Amino acid sequence: MTELTRRQFTQIAATAGFCQHPFAFQTNRKAATRPNIIFLLTDDQRWDTLGCMGNRIIQTPALDRLARQGCLFKNSFVTTSICAPSRASILTGLYARCTGIHEFDTPLASEALQQSYPLILRRTGYRTGFIGKYGAAGGGASNDFSLLPAASYDYFKGFPGQGNYFPDRRAPQRHLNGIMGDQAVEFLQGCSQSQPFCLSISFKAPHVQGLGQWPNEPAYDHLYENVVIPPPEHAASRYFEVVPGFLQRDYAGRVRWTEYMKTMSYEDIAKRYYRLITGVDVQVDRILDELTARGFAKNTVVIFTSDNGYLLGDRGLVDKYVMYEESIRTPLIVMDPRASEAKGIVREEMALNIDLAPTILDLAGIEVSKWMTGRSLKPLLGRAKPSWRSEWFYEHLFERRRPEEFPKSEGIRTERWKYTRWIDQKPPYEQLFDLKTDPDEFNNLAGSAAHQGELQTMRAKWDRWKQALQKWNRATAWHDPV
């Protein structure tokens, strides 16, 4: 959101009739043809694990082809880097502070669910499907299928919790990637040219299974076997040495990585991680082929992204949740075959996970509700240069399950500066990075006398954003405001 839209949403939140008609969405009847939409979401995939993002080792030909045919966002981020809050934000176009979901056990409120993009599309005539890890129903890692909104979709093959890469005991070699690909084909076989459709596919891959396991399809056991995958530059010990002390002791990030390294090498972990991503790419290729075979390809928008990034030994850590780039940056491709002038576009503007729901609705010709805190990416899908955001708010308010785990943080990222405020620390611990001169986030300038002016500026931005979002979530009134 820009400064203007921040003022606008504060005014909207104070409007008496704001919540009186929360489901009043209008279809733009001027749209010549309502497109079909395929939304593809991976789990814990770093932004730099696609060939089109400059990775020369990983094999992702189908996704690379999508990027050549569409728009590739080089600076895509999540506003909360952990699965359940991010997935709720993706569904609703809302910051976590507005959905009320900060951890795994809080379900998406029924009012928020009704305003999620799949249900809006269904109410306006779309056939909708969901496949894979739902991640926003509550229940943590439980297998309670009753928590899932299956009745809200025309086709639902979602699962609760984390799922399992080999879920069928009757076919122990059958990998979840392939099962989900089968389900996607089944959904498409039930579609027709007379009704637009939206299929959301949430892969489990490349999320870890349990502690330290990344089980790939058996057919890919030897993929990357003769390839050397060097550790990331930020895995050098000097980057760990400048990480705040409480992160150096963190269970989720540091202790787990230390345990992994006792029995595995970095290269072994990276190859397993890469194999899972390549396995997703194979299923994407199947889906694209099925679209072509059934005559849907020329009118189907395909969007690909991940729910958050992932540290893979970077800064001596594993997992996500922190505001370092490895954790918050994600891949993002939007391919609209109807826009021939948009092929091969690469955008540098900052896109967010909260932009995905507004984008999908906008592409479908549906008026985007002003209550959404994201904004449609549609203006960026061509060669125009619209005014765009220059900053955004980050929050991670996960309730820790043990003392040394998931410290809470908030922050601001602009095009040049990043401010992180670790709010669990007494007093709050601050980090300030100049991304122009220090893209590696090595030199914390919060204590620099020469940068106190910039620190005060970023603190003021953080405070304005926090207050504005608090007003916004009070207006929705479906959960206790943070």
Image: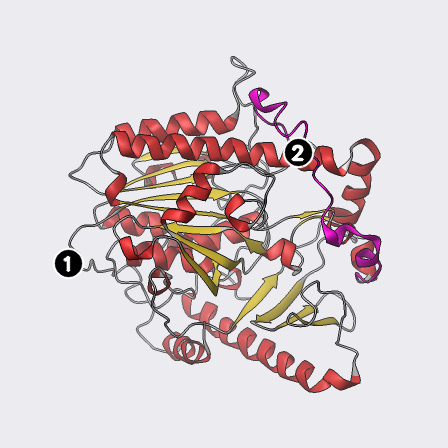
Three-letter residue code for mark 1? Arg
| Mark before the other along the chain sequence, 1 or 2 | 1
Is 117 covered by the magenta stretch? no
Q: Which residues are magenta?
A: 214-243
Instruction: Tell me the quadrant of the picture where the C terminus can be found.
Output: bottom right
Three-letter residue code for mark 2? Lys
- Does residue 464 appear to the left or right of 14 in the view shown? right
> Taking 294 as reference, is 355 above or below it?
below
The residue lying at 70 percent from left, 53 percent from top is: 400
The residue lying at 63 percent from left, 23 percent from top is: 222
In this rendered view, identify the residue nearer to me: 205 or 284.
284
> Taking 473 as reference, is 407 above or below it?
above
The image shows residue 344 at horizontal and vertical percentages of 39, 53
Asked whether residue 109 appears in the rendered view, the answer is no
The image shows residue 475 at horizontal and vertical percentages of 42, 70
Residue lying at the far top of the rendered structure? 170
The residue beneath circle 2 is: 271
> Taking 147 as reference, is 102 above or below it?
below
Label 2 secondary element: helix
The image shows residue 80 at horizontal and vertical percentages of 57, 58
Q: Nearer the viewer, mark 1 or mark 2?
A: 2
The residue lying at 84 percent from left, 35 percent from top is: 262
Q: Measure the C-alpha gap from mark 1 to mark 2.
A: 48 Å
Query: Crowdedness of circle 1 by 10 Å Cα count: few (<14), some, many (20+)?
Result: few
Instruction: Tell me the quadrant of the picture where the N terminus can be found.
Output: bottom left
The residue beneath circle 1 is: 29
In this rendered view, identify the residue nearer to me: 188 or 121.
188
The image shows residue 177 at horizontal and vertical percentages of 49, 29
Is 224 covered by the magenta stretch? yes
Decide: marks 1, 2 in contact (CB < 8 A)? no
